[in-house]
Image: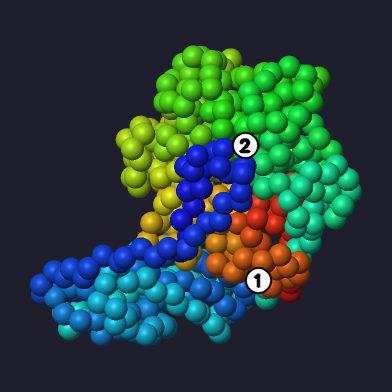
């Protein structure tokens, strides 16, 4: 498991040396039981890597009940909408760790193509069998797998600064990326303190920033940034940047003028208008069709909203943070890092410290779509999040994986391998990334990733194989 909080490190040190994210282990909770009871179990909310004949699910046991477990797994059926262990089932190896929660994975095979199944997790002890909630999924009619081809669009793995094409271009720890309607890519070249663009053919150029750490407005190439992070572009060609080190949201007009849209350079947690507001290490940023901007205020554990007039409010979360599904400022996040917004105003959050993907409705109601603090193998400290036009969610996690969570609650591992950093192009899990930080999807479905540790922009094309 990784500890992702490199943004908490004093920023000048970030630019003097590369910060490596150290591996650490978290202790599990000690076992607790309820005497004379069956176990307590929940079903995994997502189906993973679904094909026409295979799927992956699982569950979480939070209480073993009054005696030791005798069996656990998932049961499933195409006819019984509340399946039991008398239906088809998997039987997993019993945990001997003596710690809770117990999280297990079940692999299903031999499924029938084009068939709807009902599935739930189960756990048994001498007092009985308990079940989680039912999850419904439908196998595809002809999908035997997904093949993702990973290539390098620009950059060569060496940290530097060069406006050039393809592998001749150089970046230094890129941490934000987005794409406009024409297919032009915009990225925050964080350690170069510049905003760069890359064409679909891989030609890199500089949009703004002179490379000096600072806080200077005006003409784009004379402006100064301090570790720019999240980036978004509106329909008029205005670019918005979460200037993390300066604790502000910057705007670059289509005419090339840089100004401060919100925040004043002081780290704080203040709602207000324009420069009367304050942020604390703002990271991810997204913009909706009405011009409202959403910010993952990383250091404040909150999601902020900025209207087109510059009025800043708190959409959800509170300063001390945590992991709570609730409404508005009663909900809690842990160092949120990425945001995306759909056409109906729902906001999706890469809740990095909680290893979760969260959803916020336009009314501020916060729920968890995937992951959680005890499920770091499922979603491992997500850094970046994006949506396509159909509402599918794309995730870059710091464990080195690129994932897709479909509108039907199926999670696909598109590329990368958990906690195996590297710089390898290729297919699917054979491809390797190094601390990917941001992700975006163009109108054609091409996926682009700011691969921070490899100092490059990676491109993914996804093909569904019959």
Q: Which mark is residue 225?
A: none
Q: Is residue 297 above or below residue 66?
A: above
- Which quarter shows the C terminus? bottom right
Residue found 49% across the figure and 60% down from its top: 22
Residue found 54% across the figure and 74% down from its top: 55
Residue found 74% across the figure and 29% down from its top: 209
Distance between the alpha carbons at the discs numbered 1 and 2: 30 Å
Q: Is residue 95 above or below residue 353?
A: below
- In this image, 181 relative to 66: left or right? right
Picture colour scheme: rainbow
Residue ID for mark 1 = 429
Q: Nearer the viewer, residue 40 or 311?
A: 311
Residue furthest left as drawn: 35
Q: Quadrant of residue 75?
A: bottom left
Which one is in front in this view, the residue at disc 1 or the one at disc 2? 2
- In this image, 448 relative to 435: left or right? right
Label 1 Cα neighbours within 10 Å, binned few <14 / some 14-19 / many ≥20: many
- In this image, 73 relative to 16: left or right? left
Disc 1 secondary structure class: helix
Determine if residue 106 is in view: yes
Residue 420: image x %, image y %? 59, 69
Residue ID for mark 2 = 227
Determine if residue 369 is in view: no
Q: Quadrant of residue 184?
A: top right
Residue 433: image x %, image y %? 66, 62
């Amino acid at each position: 498991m990784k500890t992702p909080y490199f943004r908490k490190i004093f920023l000048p040190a970030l630019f003097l040396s590369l910060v490596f994210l150290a591996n650490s282990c978290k202790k599990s909770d000690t076992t607790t039981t309820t005497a004379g009871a069956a176990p307590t179990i929940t079903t995994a909310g997502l189906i993973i890597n679904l094909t026409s004949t295979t799927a992956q699910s699982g569950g979480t046991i939070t209480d073993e009940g009054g005696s030791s477990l005798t069996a656990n797994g998932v049961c499933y059926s195409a006819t019984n909408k509340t399946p039991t262990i008398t239906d088809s089932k998997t039987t997993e190896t019993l945990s001997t760790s003596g710690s809770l929660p117990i999280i297990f994975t079940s692999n299903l095979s031999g499924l029938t193509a084009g068939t709807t199944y009902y599935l739930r997790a189960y756990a048994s002890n001498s007092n009985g069998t308990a079940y989680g909630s039912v999850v419904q999924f439908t196998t595809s009619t002809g999908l035997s797998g997904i093949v993702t081809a990973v290539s390098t669009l620009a950059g060569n793995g060496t940290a530097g600064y060069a406006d050039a094409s393809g592998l001749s271009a150089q970046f230094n720890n890129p941490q934000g990326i987005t794409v406009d309607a024409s297919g032009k890519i915009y990225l925050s070249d964080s350690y170069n303190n510049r905003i760069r663009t890359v064409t679909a053919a891989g030609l890199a150029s500089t949009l703004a920033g002179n490379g000096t750490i600072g806080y200077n407005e005006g003409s784009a190439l004379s402006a100064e940034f301090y570790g720019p992070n999240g980036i978004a572009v509106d329909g008029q060609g205005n670019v918005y940047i979460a200037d993390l080190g300066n604790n502000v949201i910057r705007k670059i007009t289509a005419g090339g003028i840089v100004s401060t849209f919100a925040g004043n350079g002081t780290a704080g947690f203040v709602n207000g208008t324009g420069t009367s507001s304050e942020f604390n290490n703002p990271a991810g940023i997204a913009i909706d069709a009405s011009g409202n901007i959403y910010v993952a205020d990383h250091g404040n554990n909150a999601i902020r909203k900025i209207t087109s007039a510059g009025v800043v409010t708190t959409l959800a979360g509170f300063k001390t943070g945590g992991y709570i599904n609730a409404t508005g400022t009663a909900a809690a996040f842990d160092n949120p890092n990425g945001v995306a917004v759909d056409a109906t105003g729902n906001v999706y959050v890469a809740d990095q410290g909680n290893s979760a993907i969260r959803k916020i409705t336009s009314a501020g109601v916060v729920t968890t779509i995937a992951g959680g603090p005890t499920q770091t193998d499922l979603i491992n400290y997500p850094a970046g999040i994006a949506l396509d036009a159909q509402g599918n969610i794309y995730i870059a996690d710091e464990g080195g994986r690129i994932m897709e969570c479909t509108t039907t609650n199926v999670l696909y591992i598109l590329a990368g391998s958990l906690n195996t950093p590297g710089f390898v192009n290729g297919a699917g899990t054979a491809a390797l990334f190094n601390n990917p930080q941001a992700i975006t999807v163009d109108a054609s479905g091409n996926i682009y990733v700011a691969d921070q540790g490899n100092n490059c922009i990676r491109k993914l094309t996804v093909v569904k194989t019959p």
